[in-house]
Image (cartoon, rainbow, N blue to C red):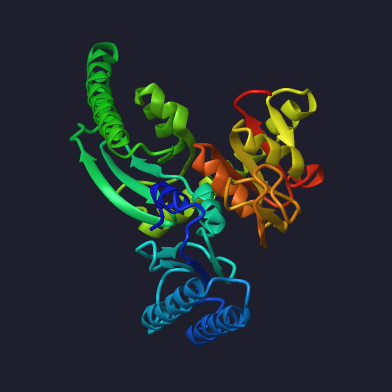
Amino acid sequence: MIRHEDVERLVSIVGSQHPITSFYLNAHLGKHSLEEQRLTAKNLLRERRLELEQRTDIDKHWKKTALADLERLDDMLKAELAGPHSYRGLAVFISSGEGLEQTYRLPQPVRNALIVDRDPYVRPLTTILDEYHRICTVLVDREAAELYEIYMGEILEHDRVFDEVPGKVRVAGWYGLEERRIERHVEDHVHRHYRHVADTVFRLFKLLGFDWLVLGAHHEIVSEFEPFLHPYLRERLIGHFHAEPRKTPLKVVLDKTLAIEQATERQEEVKLVDDLLERAGSGGLGVVGLDDTIKALLNGQVHTLVVQEEWTVPGVVCRNCGWLGREGEVCPVCGSKTDQVEDLVDEMVELAVYYGGRVEHVFADSKLKDHGHIGALLRFRV
């Protein structure tokens, strides 16, 4: 499972003197058979070998190392694709010179790619990380609860809570006073149970630091239980669905939670783009468009890089000082020769992460497509 720390570790390898191979494969068996996946990997390897062998503009030792890494990648893929698997995407990074050899099995398909460069190609990983949040889903009724962690399409049960609560009974009494006393006694037990569950959820929050909270319960129980949650948890509550502990199947819990996550993610993206466009339009802490976003990145202004899903643009990068732009054979900053790159956006993503900024990918049909496909929220104005 990929984590933010993994991407940060990869991004820290900037402008390496050694070749770094980044491999991505759409490994969704529901869409592509195992044999098709093997053939895709074989073709990508063959094309990249041929390209490297024919290049005369690179160092011979660098080329030899890159070709050796491709052979190692071939062996790894033969073992990885030897039989059926449950993951939908595969990412492999290899650099014998950097001592790097890492495989990530991903929860969603990725575009097939094999890139040999001086730094890892990480943009597909940042896209996936941006789409998934760590969620705590709590199924609760008046005497039981189940706590689940859901992350990257997987579900893990963490805890169960059960508190004995007396049943409601009807008894004779002076003007119903006895019956009301018993009802208050029952409600007191229910409230203790809710407090017990809420405390358990808060302990899990301090342990995991989950992003969002989802409740599974009858509608009336949601309104009863919610006030017992710590304010930090109420801020993270993004939705609820009809469910009962000990009765609702695990798959239903997962599917309902993922549907709420996806809807919330889209809402958050709309708010983010609206905020960005408002700030950029008023001359505030926001810019849109490729050129202005590049300038802000190079000035260290970017707090959050916002980019449209799957949008790419070619460009050039200076491996000596880190300058990047649309074109130019010579770096305007240090005078070094620039390298051409197929996806300038990936270089921008890496630069944003390297300087401690956030990266947010928004859906292709957002308003950002009419404003250059890319932009940034800024820390300060120059």
Residue 368 at what x, y percent from top left? 75, 43
The residue sitting at 38% across, 42% down in the picture is: 136
Q: Is residue 246 visible to us here?
A: no
Q: Residue furthest left?
A: 164
Going by the image, does 213 lie left or right of 319? left
The residue sitting at 45% across, 53% down in the picture is: 13
Q: Residue furthest right?
A: 370
Q: Quadrant of residue 109?
A: bottom right
Q: Is residue 195 above or below residue 12?
A: above
The residue sitting at 36% across, 26% down in the picture is: 229
Q: Quick one: 298 or 337, which is closer to the camera? A: 337
Residue 315 at what x, y percent from top left? 71, 56
Residue 164 at what x, y percent from top left? 18, 35
Q: Is residue 137 visible to us here?
A: yes
Q: Dividing the image into 4 quarters, which one contains the N terminus?
A: bottom left
Residue 238 at what x, y percent from top left? 50, 36
Q: Quadrant of residue 190?
A: top left
Q: Quick one: 295 or 156, which is closer to the camera? A: 295
Q: Dividing the image into 4 quarters, which one contains the C terminus?
A: top right
Going by the image, does 259 lie left or right of 143? right
Q: Quick one: 85 or 16, which is closer to the camera? A: 16
